Image (tube, rainbow, N blue to C red):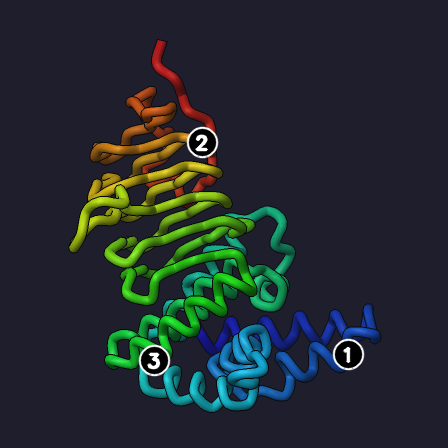
């Protein structure tokens, strides 16, 4: 799957160069000169996150090492890219999401920071968290555990706390907070199960579980567990119905199906 996807991305970019020659240098540097998706992701994230303190070249070497040592990251990158293409109607092709969508960029940068955190390189992981927040307006703690097949749409203003756990195949819109109460310590952040769709501006607070296939309406404040395959909405959120699909994250239908 990964090799086929990389071939598709290179073919897309080659066609784009023929149609928009002014992008030729950019597309060659970010895609065509790389032998693999792993190297391209490393290069792209290092260029995005480089600074006067740690430049892009130094980050590229670091990211290359991390991705080579942990092939599961690129497997997750592949599933995230497929999810973004399949669920976001604004994505015209795979290369568009890879090159230009900051939700995708923030998520893949987090994956590198998370690997460093697991290696015990916590200060470096926190430095990357700070850079990710500054560059992409997305704040994901590197200790959080996030599965694959994740769509972070638009991304601006998303916060994912230290003890969050996100399973596979989840879709999150902009302005979402998965946070703590501000007074608890230890395991204090939400657990989001597979197939969940979280609407724009929703706040899920505390060590609560959002059950598999649930839907959280836009602007909701969730303070308690949500049962699987249930739709909640409001401030505070209450049950208003059930999603039409078993995995609302995949069909991206934000309708609430309010019970009469």
Say which of 188 and 200 sits in front: 188
Say which of 31 and 128 sits in front: 128
User: Residue 260 at what x, y percent from top left?
Assistant: 36, 8
User: Residue 254 at what x, y percent from top left?
Assistant: 47, 32
Q: Is residue 8 above or below residue 176?
A: below
Disc number at residue 219? 2
Badge 2 crowding class, 10 Å Cα cut-off, few under 14, some 14 to 19, many 20 or more, is some
Q: Residue furthest top?
A: 260
Say which of 201 and 55 sits in front: 55
* Badge nearest the viewer, 2 or 1: 2
Disc number at residue 71? 3
Q: Tell me, yes or no, if residue 81 can be seen here.
A: no
Q: Quadrant of the N terminus?
A: bottom left
The secondary element bearing badge 3 is classed as helix
The residue under the point 62% across, 77% down is: 10
Q: Which residue is mark 1?
A: 24
Q: CA distance from mark 2 to mark 1?
A: 41 Å
User: Which of the two labelled residues, at mark 1 and mark 3, occupies the earlier sequence position?
Assistant: 1
Q: Is residue 242 above or below residue 182?
A: above
Q: Quadrant of residue 23?
A: bottom right
């Amino acid at each position: 799957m990964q090799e086929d996807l990389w071939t598709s991305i290179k073919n897309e970019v080659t066609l784009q160069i023929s149609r928009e020659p002014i992008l030729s240098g950019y597309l060659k540097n970010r895609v065509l000169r790389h032998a693999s998706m792993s190297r391209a992701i490393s290069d792209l994230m290092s260029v995005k996150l480089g600074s006067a303190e740690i430049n892009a070249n130094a980050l590229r070497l670091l990211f290359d090492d991390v991705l080579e040592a942990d092939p599961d990251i690129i497997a997750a990158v592949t599933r995230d890219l497929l999810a973004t293409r399949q669920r976001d109607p604004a994505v015209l092709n795979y290369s568009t999401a890879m090159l230009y969508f900051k939700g995708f960029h923030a998520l893949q940068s987090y994956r590198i920071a998370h690997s460093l955190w697991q290696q015990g390189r916590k200060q470096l992981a926190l430095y990357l968290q700070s850079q990710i927040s500054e560059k992409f307006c997305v704040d994901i703690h590197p200790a959080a555990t996030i599965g694959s097949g994740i769509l972070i749409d638009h991304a601006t203003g998303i916060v994912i706390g230290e003890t969050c756990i996100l399973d596979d195949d989840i879709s999150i819109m902009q302005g979402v907070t998965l946070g703590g109460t501000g007074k608890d310590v230890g395991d204090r952040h939400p657990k989001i199960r597979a197939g969940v769709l979280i609407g724009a501006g929703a706040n899920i607070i505390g060590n609560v579980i959002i059950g598999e296939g649930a839907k959280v309406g836009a602007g909701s404040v969730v303070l308690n567990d949500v049962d699987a395959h249930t739709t909640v909405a409001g401030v505070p959120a209450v049950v208003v119905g059930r999603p039409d699909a078993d995995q609302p994250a995949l069909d991206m239908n934000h309708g609430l199906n309010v019970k009469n």
